[in-house]
Amino acid sequence: MKQSILVAIVLLVAHAGLESSYAQTAEPKEKPKIKKKVKAKKIQHVVCFKFKDDASREQIKEVENAFAALKKKIPEIDKLEWGTNNSPEGLNKGFTHCFIVTFPNEKAREVYLPHPDHKAFVAILKPILDDVFVIDFAK
């Protein structure tokens, strides 16, 4: 009987030792990390033009049409809006035209800036451009 008790104690101690050893070496279960999808922010590219005093109405119209046509020529453009100043405040400093180009992300803007069709537009614009103001922001 003493021998049976002794064998039972040895087996219990051995079993406890194995469980302890396993608990120390087993890797703890981690909860799977859920990656939050970060939505790319749209880029608003705002461009304002001040034309030279001797720019003709036809030349300005050509610039308007050429800029508006970029939407169809450059697929990275999500949206293109434009208009002429009609503010009653008189703070436009001679800038008459404002174009807002919306890109889905910064990468699209990076494609747009050196794009051949954008460069061709700039070539039409430069001869009659007195000044330009550009500001971009993300939303």
Image (cartoon, rainbow, N blue to C red):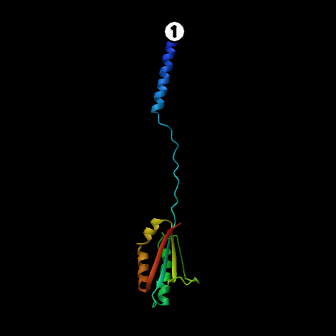
Crowd band around label 1 with a 10 angstrom C-alpha radius: few (<14), some (14–19), many (20+):
few
Nearer to us in this view, 72 or 62: 62
Residue at screen point 48% across, 31% down: 23
Where is residue 91? Give x, y as percent: 53, 82
The total number of labels drawn is 1
Which residue in the rendered view is the most extreme toward the right?
88
Residue at screen point 53% across, 49% down: 34
Nearer to us in this view, 131 or 105: 131
Q: Which kind of residue does numbered mark 1 sit on?
A: Lys
User: Is residue 18 visible in this depiction of the protein?
Assistant: yes
Q: Label 1: which residue?
A: 2
**Residue 82 to residue 16: above or below:** below
User: What secondary structure is found at the residue carrying circle 1?
Assistant: helix
Residue at screen point 44% across, 84% down: 129
User: Is residue 43 visible in this depiction of the protein?
Assistant: no
Where is residue 24? Give x, y as percent: 46, 31
Where is residue 86? Give x, y as percent: 57, 83
**Residue 8 to residue 57: above or below:** above
Which residue in the rendered view is the most extreme toward the top?
1
Nearer to us in this view, 89 or 78: 89
